[in-house]
């Protein structure tokens, strides 16, 4: 018999380095954080005239939604994620039963910590669990396929043409571990993230980060146009010499992707050597390229970067898609982060909880 109850937790993430590289088949180095989203699902067997229904309660917002499993319709805000997950699960051969959902979380929304991917992944795991007979079946599901399903929700139901960085980080995260993700092969390689008293903190810029309504999609379109002019399938295939011949701003957009892929490679080498000082320098170099080449920084973001550096951070950069959100800073053991900064540590990935 299918399960009657399920509870799933999915974490947000911090992308240590490698920004706007995922949808260009490049490299990134994120880690899952302790904060995330929890979804509790209870099967409901009372069908209405239009078949099984989903009722969802966003506890933190005090908002409700209800719709037919057979024909979810587009909706704004958090409802788009719920309806999209239900629709995509149906297309993937996991039509959810009627269910009552409770959604809660402690990851800040709109701060560049990927609350949206945490919501998608937790919804997916909780709803699929109602359809299988044991935990081992749930755990055997292909997590890359789950990330791809959640990515379709983000793109087709929410309207943000994101890559899979956020979903893969949420699904594959582990304590004291960063994830080197190759978006051409979708290979996920664990990399030790031994802080040894150093601290990674995030500081909210005070400017809300909304992928779908920001310049994120415009930057992605720039990369697509650069590929068209270069005659390549992705910027991963482009050479620095060819990129130099592109018109502006496409030249700078593509240059950032090539530079940022190198930043990831250098960061992996630094982490394997426990060289956190070099990691800090790479964070600063990444921020410079995001500001100058990709133009996703803002005055509020730059002010947050300066606050962290002024307090003694060895490196700081904007995380997430940019245009607001949070800034990441790396501090030596004896340095004191500024007021309002929140420490983050690499933590476990998405998993089921006892119902």
Image: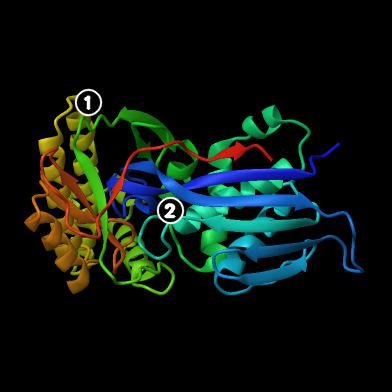
The residue that appears at 14% across and 48% down in the rendered structure is 336
The nearer-to-camera label among 2 and 1 is 1
Instruction: Rate crowding at label 2 as few (under 14), some (14 to 19) or many (20 or more) other CA atoms within 10 Å.
Output: many
Q: Compared to 118, does 219 lie above or below? A: below
Q: Position of residue 29 (x, y in %)?
A: 31, 41
Q: Quadrant of residue 50?
A: bottom right
Residues 86 and 262: in front is 86
The residue that appears at 63% across and 34% down in the rendered structure is 141
Q: Compared to 77, does 44 lie above or below? A: above
Q: CA distance from mark 2 to mark 1?
A: 26 Å
Q: Which residue is mark 2?
A: 163
Look at the numbered disc 1 and give the secondary structure of its residue: helix
Is residue 108 visible to us here? yes
The residue that appears at 42% across and 55% down in the rendered structure is 114
Q: Position of residue 286 (x, y in %)?
A: 18, 52
Q: Which mark is residue 272?
A: 1
Look at the numbered disc 2 and give the secondary structure of its residue: loop
Q: Quadrant of residue 57?
A: bottom right
Q: Compared to 44, does 332 lie above or below? A: above
Residue positioned most to the right: 49
Instruction: Rate crowding at label 1 as few (under 14), some (14 to 19) or many (20 or more) other CA atoms within 10 Å.
Output: few
- Side of 33 relative to 260 (left or right): right
Q: Compared to 254, does 71 lie above or below? A: below
The residue that appears at 33% across and 40% down in the rendered structure is 345
- Side of 38 relative to 54 (left or right): left
Lower position in the chain sequence, tag 2 or tag 1: 2
Q: Position of residue 264 (x, y in %)?
A: 24, 40
């Amino acid at each position: 018999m299918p399960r009657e109850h399920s509870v799933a937790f999915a974490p947000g993430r911090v992308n240590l380095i490698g920004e706007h590289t995922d949808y260009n088949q490049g490299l990134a180095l994120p880690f899952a954080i302790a904060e995330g989203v929890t979804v509790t699902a209870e099967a409901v067997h009372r069908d209405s005239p239009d078949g099984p229904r989903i009722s969802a309660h966003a506890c933190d917002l005090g908002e409700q939604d209800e719709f037919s499993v057979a024909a979810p319709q587009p909706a704004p805000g958090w409802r788009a994620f719920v309806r999209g997950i239900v629709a995509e699960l149906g297309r993937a051969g996991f039509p959810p039963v009627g269910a009552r959902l409770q959604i809660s979380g402690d990851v800040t929304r709109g701060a560049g910590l990927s609350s949206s991917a945490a919501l998608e992944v937790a919804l997916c795991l909780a709803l699929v669990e109602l359809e299988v007979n044991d935990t081992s079946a749930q755990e055997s599901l292909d997590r890359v396929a789950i990330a791809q399903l959640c990515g379709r929700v983000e793109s087709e139901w929410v309207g943000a043409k994101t890559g899979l960085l956020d979903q893969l980080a949420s699904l594959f995260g582990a304590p004291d571990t960063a994830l080197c993700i190759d978006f051409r092969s979708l290979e996920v390689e664990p990399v030790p993230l031994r802080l040894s008293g150093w601290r990674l903190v995030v500081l909210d810029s005070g400017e809300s980060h909304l992928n779908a309504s920001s310049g994120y999609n415009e930057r992605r379109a720039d990369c697509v146009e650069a590929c068209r002019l270069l005659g390549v399938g992705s910027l991963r295939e482009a050479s620095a010499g060819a990129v130099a011949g592109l018109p502006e701003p496409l030249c700078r957009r593509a240059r950032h992707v090539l530079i940022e892929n190198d930043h990831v490679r250098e960061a992996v080498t630094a982490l394997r050597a426990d060289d956190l000082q070099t990691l800090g320098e790479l964070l600063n170099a990444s921020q410079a390229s995001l500001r100058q080449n990709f133009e996703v920084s803002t005055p509020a973001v730059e002010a947050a970067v300066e606050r962290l550096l002024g307090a003694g951070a060895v490196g700081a950069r904007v995380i997430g898609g940019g245009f607001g959100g949070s800034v990441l800073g790396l501090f030596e053991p004896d340095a004191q982060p500024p007021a309002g900064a929140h420490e983050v540590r690499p933590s476990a990935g998405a998993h089921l909880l006892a119902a």
